[in-house]
Amino acid sequence: MNSRRIVALAYMFVAVIAAMCGRIPAFSETSIAVRSFEFTYVTKIPALPGGAKLSRIWIPVPQSDADQTISGLKIESPFPYAPHREAEYGNGYVYLEVPAAEVASPAEVRVHFHVTRREHRVSLGAQRTARKAGSRAADLRRFLQPDQRVPLQGIIGELSEQHTRGIQEPLAKARAIYDYVIATMRYDKSGTGWGNGDAVWACTAKRGNCTDFHSLFIGMMRAAGIPARFEIGFPLPEEPHAGSIPGYHCWAEFYVEPFGWIPVDASEAWKHPEKKDYFFGANDDNRVQFSVGRDIRLEPPQQGEPLNYFIYPYAELDGKPLALESKFSFQD
């Protein structure tokens, strides 16, 4: 038995005991996969031009929840910083406000932490054992509303109605939309237009990356009256067990009683057709989540537009967006 499976079994034992004591929620499945790893997120700040006055930087930081435990957070910064959390979704980040004169040469901010990531798997055929989220109606309302690039009217609403017509059960509607997205889209990052999470572009171009897949899915779900939310983080390869990570990965969750929030990864299902059924109701442990939601308004507020999504560092120099480089790595 490999070390990762031993960790999973050990965690399940601890989870059961802790749940009995009321410290963490019990999981519905008899066994889940668990992955533990170190993660490093580096933000590179370039030397700023003469005459500039003030740079402001927001760097996302992941949080613990039912699917992951974040511990040992360490931030190395040559400049003062403060932790913050935006109001709408509760996403966490650190905020730096640095006079441009203090950035005469390139600098780095390093965020390092330990992650214990648990597979999220909902037994859709066993309602009595489903893990419930206990979300209030007020909490769900936002996830029935449009985003700037995810309208619910026009072609998105028409597609949703067309592919759920005659279906009454919300779970069956969700599966019909999931099947449509996978059958219609293809994972293709050639050319331009992909990666913006524009649901109308996605359903017209019929291609894109995970952002485009899940924007179309979320738009059709919300148009069908089913709350759905966007989640984004970073993927980890199963092998090797250390290395750099080239970019983000996103997925979705939708809410149906009595199950609560149900995970979906339509783009991974497209890449791995043999796992199509698995990714409707499950997310594996090869990931770490950083934030939830679209059209994000930070605090202190940015002067630019709300963020389309929040996974990379965002910065402004004298009120105008400033591009920053970043790199990410992990080690099991």
Image: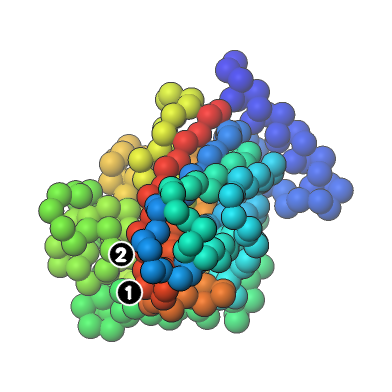
* Residue at the image position 43 percent from the left and 48 percent from the top: 106
Q: Residues within 10 Å of mark 2 (few under 14, many from 20)?
A: many
Q: How many marks?
A: 2
Q: On the picture, is 251 further left or further right than 65?
A: left
Where does the image place residue 267, in percent across and percent down from the top left? Answer: 32, 50
Where does the image place residue 22, in percent across and percent down from the top left? Answer: 83, 53
Q: Earlier in the sequence, mark 2 or mark 1?
A: 1
The residue wearing badge 2 is 197
- Label 2 sits on a secondary structure element that is loop
Please say whether residue 88 is visible from this viewpoint: yes
Q: Are marks 2 and 1 in contact (CB under 8 Å)?
A: yes
Instruction: Check disc 1 and give the amino acid type.
Output: Val
* Residue at the image position 27 percent from the left and 53 percent from the top: 209
Where does the image place residue 18, in percent across and percent down from the top left? Answer: 81, 44
Instruction: Check disc 2 and give the amino acid type.
Output: Gly
The residue wearing badge 1 is 150
* Residue at the image position 43 percent from the left and 78 percent from the top: 303
Q: Is residue 95 above or below residue 37?
A: below
* Residue at the image position 31 percent from the left and 39 percent from the top: 272
